[in-house]
Amino acid sequence: MKVKISQSTIECVEGDITQQNTDAIVNAANTTLLGGGGVDGAIHRVGGPKILEECKKIGGCPTGEARITTGGRLKVQYVIHTVGPFYKDGKGKEAEFLASAYRNSLKLASQHQIKTISFPSISTGAYGYPLELAAQLALKTVIEYIKEHPEIEQVRFVLFGERAFKAYSDALQVLISKNSGN
């Protein structure tokens, strides 16, 4: 699914984030930035040791913030590492931290003249964020950002599995309907 928002395009695809050819991909990292499971482990495995070397020099990343490294052996020039929240009950600052993870990743992209970027579904794996809630929040945050930042030409959500793809596609359709007044 692909839609035009202002000067930018948002796209949802089912696939492997390590195989993307955008300028940057976003890594759903942990606070140490030293690799882990899921998306994080896959990016470090495919990207090779250069990414880990740079992550060690950075020295970690707090929840909701983002850091940038080379793409290593990946097809992309950059990897933006961001740390999403662990989901507890939704009554804390989980939504605030998740929105910050997306927003701060996009801010780094703007600062580094990155025009195309691919995101995974941050915090919905081992961190337990409910997929449908995360999809709505991620897309809403990205749409708000790109409306104000036309330098970001394309945001691709690369989703693992049919369930994640459907959650993001459905959320995007709802947000587009709301924004168009339907």
Image (cartoon, grey):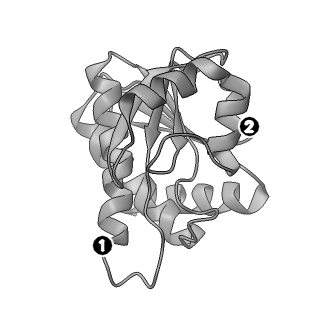
Furthest-left residue in this view: 148
What is the x, y in percent for residue 58?
Answer: 37, 30
Left or right: 40 with respect to 95? right
Q: Residue at x 52, y 14 (%)?
A: 77
Residue 159 at least partly seen: no
Label 2 vs 1, first from the N-terminus: 2
Amino acid type, residue under disc 2 in the picture: Asp
Amino acid type, residue under disc 1 in the picture: Lys
Q: Quadrant of the N terminus?
A: top right
- Circle 1 sits in a helix, a strand or a loop, which is it? loop
Q: Quadrant of residue 140?
A: bottom left
Residue in front for this viewpoint, 180 or 157: 157
Query: Mark 2: few, some, or many residues within 10 Å (few <14, many ≥20)?
Result: some
Residue 6 at least partly seen: yes
What is the x, y in percent for residue 15?
Answer: 75, 40
Furthest-right residue in this view: 162
Q: Which marked residue is nearer to the observer: mark 2 or mark 1?
A: 1
Query: Does 112 sit above or below residue 109?
Result: above
Marks 2 and 1 sit apart, C-alpha to C-alpha, by: 29 Å
Residue in front for this viewpoint, 156 or 47: 47
Query: Does 142 sit above or below residue 54?
Result: below
Query: Which numbered marker is on residue 93?
Result: 1
Query: Which numbered marker is on residue 142?
Result: none
Q: Which residue is mark 2?
A: 16
Q: Residue at x 37, y 70 (%)?
A: 94
